[in-house]
């Protein structure tokens, strides 16, 4: 399958949005933004929505799209289920069967595979469509059950959360924590430099979402992680995270 | 330098080799003669392979091999400047060794424990010269893995921390320093890699094979969490988690997995038993 000449709406606040736009247009599709929704609502082929940190924004955007496409329930909405389940996002819509979750982190160039998580309500035909769509972007897919953060974002976010606890407690310096995980157990990046690359807001959204939905102590966010997001120190994107990045 | 390593198991002999390769004189001490003999043939095997691969000459091999002196007596370690303890992870055993060492060795000797899970502060408590007792945690296999964690017990002196850091650098290792907290850095921060994957499996979100594929292909990790548990030994991995959990006073973030416990109870421990999360019997 190819997405050449298809129309894909990419909406949402995550840093994933920009990278997805580039990746999708590289594969020949026409990328549209939210303010072009009304103009193209009769001809849109796919919707990708990627808000994670602010869930009120996510709800507003999803409902706006769902309403504009009310007459076309066959158009799939692929939404990030990083901070919230796809099932909950689908529950906000009038056509929940078209909503399917997915999740990953930037940079997309380093992801050979992207996870998909159908909501309880997702129709099988929609799952097939979004699977083919993601594969047309030259990414392998793996279908997992719908739970906050899927697999890779959930596991990595909790590793990062633990690294932040260790940092807060003064167990070791940020540099030593990163070196230790690369040289002692072969991680591709140290957890704190990795968080800076992904965006601390994205990581925090996953941990907070797990804590909110599952309620277990194991998902309690490190308070420093939350404070850094509130202070706008989200990583490379803002030139300041655990490390400083001067342009 | 005159170095001694106590405990001639896999870790101890590996550490002895790392020291001997950098020109240190090493006394490798174990109370069990057959363990010492096994260690010597293990060292021979590794050094022979180094010669075959052209990494060292025959005479270099001999020199390294001869610089590791096996002994069964703790008294023999009296003149050592650095002692590295690498015996099984039992507090009573380690406490006894450090009590003896603090009496036998000179006051300036650095006494280091390769423990991965026991508090350095607790090992050192009551010993003569607690300021020179520190952790020096190597990773398995010690001759290959570059990292060492230098652990500051509550009474370790900063001067001695710096000495151990320098010693580790001279061994060609990459040292990091950390305070005496459960699991130190790596064994603590790596817990969610295994535990959360097990939790995801327990909730039937994905299969072990799927999770491994996702973590390697989406995450860029070299090995998936289940293949890695099979390699490490599920019993070893479970024991580490239990120890971190216990020492953090049952902090929920480290809660062990019942799936892993059942695997241990069933004796499905990974590659070494022919099966773990995957089957290796064919």
Image (cartoon, coloured by chain):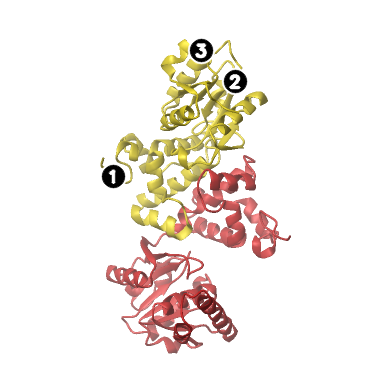
Chain colours: A yellow, B red
- To which chain does the residue with label 1 belong? A
The residue that mark 2 highlights is A96
Residue A124, given in percent of the width and then of the height, sits at 67, 26
Q: CA distance from mark 2 to mark 1?
A: 43 Å
The residue that mark 1 highlights is A244
Q: Are marks 2 and 1 in contact (CB under 8 Å)?
A: no
Left or right of B282 in this view: B172? left
Residue B200, given in percent of the width and then of the height, sits at 59, 43
Residue A138 against residue B9 in the figure, above or below: above
Residue B250: mark in rendering: none
Q: B57 and A40: which one is in front? A: B57
Q: Earlier in the sequence, mark 2 or mark 1?
A: 2
Q: Earlier in the sequence, mark 3 or mark 2?
A: 3
Q: Are marks 3 and 2 in contact (CB under 8 Å)?
A: no
SS at mark 1 in the image: loop
* Residue at image location 57% in from the left, 56% down from the top: B228
Q: A187 and B91: which one is in front? A: A187
| Number of the front mark, 3 or 2 | 3
Question: Is residue A69 visible to the viewer in this orientation of the structure?
Answer: yes
Residue A221, given in percent of the width and then of the height, sits at 43, 41
> Dot 2: few (<14), some (14–19), or many (≥20) neighbours within 10 Å?
many
The residue that mark 3 highlights is A41
Q: CA distance from mark 1 to mark 3?
A: 43 Å
> Dot 3: few (<14), some (14–19), or many (≥20) neighbours within 10 Å?
some
* Residue at image location 43% in from the left, 36% down from the top: A202
| Number of the front mark, 2 or 1 | 1
């Amino acid at each position: 399958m190819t997405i050449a000449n298809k129309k894909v709406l990419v909406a949402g606040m995550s840093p994933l949005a920009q990278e997805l736009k580039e990746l999708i247009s590289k594969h020949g599709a026409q990328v549209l933004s939210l303010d072009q929704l009304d103009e193209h609502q009769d001809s849109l082929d796919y919707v990708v929505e990627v808000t994670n940190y602010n869930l009120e924004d996510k709800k507003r955007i999803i409902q706006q799209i769902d309403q504009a496409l009310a007459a076309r329930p066959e158009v799939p909405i692929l939404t990030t289920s990083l901070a919230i389940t796809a099932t909950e996002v689908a529950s906000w819509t009038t056509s929940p069967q078209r909503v399917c979750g997915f999740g990953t982190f930037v940079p997309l160039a380093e992801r050979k595979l992207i996870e998909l998580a159908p909501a309880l309500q997702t129709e099988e035909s929609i799952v097939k469509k979004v699977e083919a769509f993601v594969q047309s972007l030259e990414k392998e897919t793996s279908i997992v059950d719908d739970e906050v953060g899927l697999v890779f974002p959930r596991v990595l976010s909790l590793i990062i959360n633990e690294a932040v606890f260790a940092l807060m407690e003064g167990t070791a310096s940020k540099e030593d924590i990163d070196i230790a995980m690369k040289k002692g157990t072969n991680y591709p990046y140290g957890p704190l430099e990795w968080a800076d690359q992904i965006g601390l807001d994205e990581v925090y959204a996953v941990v907070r979402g797990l804590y909110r939905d599952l309620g277990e102590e194991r998902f309690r966010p490190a308070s420093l992680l939350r404070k850094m997001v509130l202070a706008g120190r989200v990583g490379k994107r803002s030139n300041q995270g655990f490390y400083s990045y001067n342009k | 330098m005159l170095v001694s390593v106590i405990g001639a198991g896999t870790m101890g002999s590996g550490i002895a080799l790392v020291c001997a390769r950098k020109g240190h004189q090493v006394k490798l001490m174990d109370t069990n003669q057959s363990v010492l003999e096994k260690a010597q043939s293990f060292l021979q095997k590794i050094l022979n392979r180094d010669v075959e691969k052209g990494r060292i000459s025959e005479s270099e091999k001999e020199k390294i091999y001869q610089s590791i002196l096996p002994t069964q007596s703790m008294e023999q370690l009296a003149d050592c400047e650095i002692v590295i303890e690498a015996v099984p992870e039992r507090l009573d055993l380690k406490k006894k060794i450090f009590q003896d060492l603090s009496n036998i060795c000179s006051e300036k000797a650095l006494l280091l424990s390769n423990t991965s899970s026991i508090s350095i502060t607790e090992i050192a408590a009551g010993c003569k010269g607690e300021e020179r007792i520190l952790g020096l945690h190597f990773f398995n296999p010690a001759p290959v893995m570059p990292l060492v964690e230098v652990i500051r017990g509550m009474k370790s002196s900063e001067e001695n921390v710096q000495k151990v850091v320098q010693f580790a650098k001279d061994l060609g290792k990459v040292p990091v320093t950390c305070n005496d907290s459960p699991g130190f850095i790596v064994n603590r921060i790596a817990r969610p890699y295994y535990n959360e994957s097990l939790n995801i499996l327990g909730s039937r979100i994905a299969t072990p094979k799927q999770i491994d594929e996702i973590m390697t292909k989406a995450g860029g990790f070299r090995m998936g969490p289940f293949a890695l548990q099979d390699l490490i030994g599920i019993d070893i991995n479970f024991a580490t988690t239990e120890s971190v959990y216990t020492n953090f006073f049952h902090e929920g973030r480290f809660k062990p997995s019942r799936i892993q416990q059942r695997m241990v109870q069933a004796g499905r421990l990974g590659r070494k038993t022919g099966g773990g999360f995957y089957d290796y019997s064919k």
